[in-house]
Amino acid sequence: MGAASVYDRFRIFHSGGIMKRIPAFVLLVALSFAWSTPAKAQIFMGPNSARRAQKAGKQEHKANNKAAKKQQKAMKKYQKSQRKAARRTHWRI
């Protein structure tokens, strides 16, 4: 009975059961460490930090304005198509 249990432990270890779990555990530890480290999000340091932050803010503002303009244009186009569709159905009746 004692020899069989030693054999079973040896067989389980080398059959791949534990061997497949070790790389998964190592990957889990590595990813948890990577996710726990804080990300640098737009932190500017150095002599030109104020200028770089101002420039980044300006670019973001410009991008927001462009997106807003695009959305307004799409809304106008949709409203125009709705008016046109309403006129078509009005004349058909």
Image: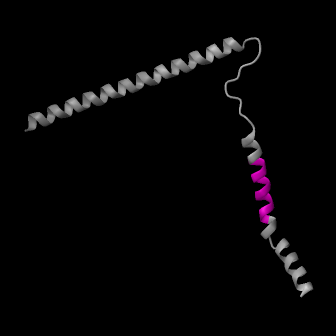
The quadrant of the rendering that contains the C terminus is top left
Identify which residue is drawn at 65% across, 16% down: 53
The quadrant of the rendering that contains the N terminus is bottom right
Task: Give the vertical position of 61 relative to 9 (above or below).
Answer: above
Front residue of this view, candidates 88 and 61 = 61
Residue 6 in percent (x, y) is at 90, 80
Magenta region, main secondary structure: helix
The stretch drawn in magenta includes residue 25: yes
Identify which residue is drawn at 31% across, 27% down: 77
In this picture, which residue range is highlighted in magenta? 20-31
Task: Give the vertical position of 52 relative to 4 (above or below).
Answer: above
Task: Give the vertical position of 33 relative to 60 (above or below).
Answer: below
Task: Give the vertical position of 84 relative to 63 (above or below).
Answer: below
Question: Which quadrant of the structure image shows residue 12?
Answer: bottom right
Residue 7 in percent (x, y) is at 88, 81
Identify which residue is drawn at 78% across, 51% down: 29
Front residue of this view, candidates 60 and 89 = 60
The stretch drawn in magenta includes residue 19: no
Identify which residue is drawn at 79% across, 58% down: 23
Colouring rule applied to residues: one colour
The residue sitting at the right extreme is: 3
The residue sitting at the left extreme is: 93
Asked whether, in this view, residue 27 is left or right of residue 72, the answer is right
Front residue of this view, candidates 20 and 87 = 20
Residue 42 in percent (x, y) is at 67, 24
